[in-house]
Amino acid sequence: MKTLDVKKSIKIVLGRINIIRSAVSALIFLNMILTEFTVSAQAVMFNFDNAPIHTSLPIDQTVAGITAHFSATGQGYSIQEANTMSFTPLGFAGLCIYPNAVYQADLLISFDQTLTDFSIMYACQKLGCDDAATMRVTAFMKGSVVGTNTRTATNPGTWPTDTLRCSFQQGFNSVVVHYDSRPPTCQDYGVIFLADNMQVTSYNTTATEKHKLFINELIIPNPVSQSAIISFSLFQPGHININIYDIAGKAIENLFDGHLNTGQNQIKWNVNDNSVNSGLYYLKVTGENFSLCSKLIVK
């Protein structure tokens, strides 16, 4: 009896080990899939410390391959020391963007490439107030509005510091930073602001463009029940391999392995012919210079 119990326990343990092993394999495969599509875009900081001091905008600044063109409306802004007023707003240091006059002016910034994220630290003029002014950033793509966002300093007082941000995944290549509205109850304020520590994230199209150079419009009907027509366009002829993988990363079927010509191509997958169970699968199209994956669901 004890022998049977031991065998049963061993069987249970082995079963659990197999489940864990399958889960680990699946995670490894999913990581491989995500690695192919994930493009890490690093934020780039402009702190203006290398900008020409006492110079009025417009100026250009380049950091980590991103060039920003700074200009302004009205009497504009210039590059000055952050402590020009004999004190430095919290978080500011070195050189910053400084108003040329006490009159309102917009800060205009354009970029030589597409961005997804923008932020800039600001400090609006006001003395000992219980509320703060509202700042606005509006993003544009080739002159068309993409979106806008506002910010009111969370800790009002004297020249309070906060960060104005916007994020639009469709991308933008210019922004306008605007003093949107005065502090509601404050009496000792001005419609001007200082700016420092601008941070941007580039819209990295490397992976997308890499695929588009060779393949476009990979169309897979989802979900798949009996059969599916997989369509795609090739920009150049070449040897193409198409495989179906299960969630554990195991190749369960090769749909095509051979030469295909430029233009529209279609590959048929007869699901029922191979008794494929319902669930999540991955289709991988591999060429001589590219590899592209997409998930599909079998019902």
Image (cartoon, rainbow, N blue to C red):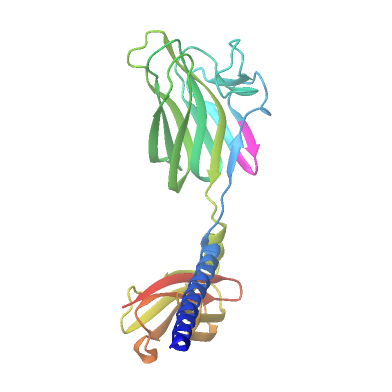
Across and down, in percent, residue 117 comes to 49, 42
| 62 drawn magenta | yes
Across and down, in percent, residue 200 comes to 54, 40
Give the residue drawn at x 48%, y 77%: 13
Q: Is residue 150 left or right of residue 82?
A: left
| 266 drawn magenta | no
Vertical side of 236 occupied by 162: above or below: above
Across and down, in percent, residue 132 comes to 39, 19
* Residue interval drawn in magenta: 60-67
Q: Quadrant of the N terminus?
A: bottom left
Kindly report the secondary structure that dominates the magenta region of the rendered protein.
Answer: strand
Q: Is residue 121 left or right of residue 275?
A: right
Regarding residue 223, the answer to whether it shows in the image is: yes
Vertical side of 253 occupied by 280: above or below: above
Give the residue drawn at x 55%, y 65%: 36
Q: Is residue 38 left or right of residue 167?
A: right
The residue at the far front in this view is 1
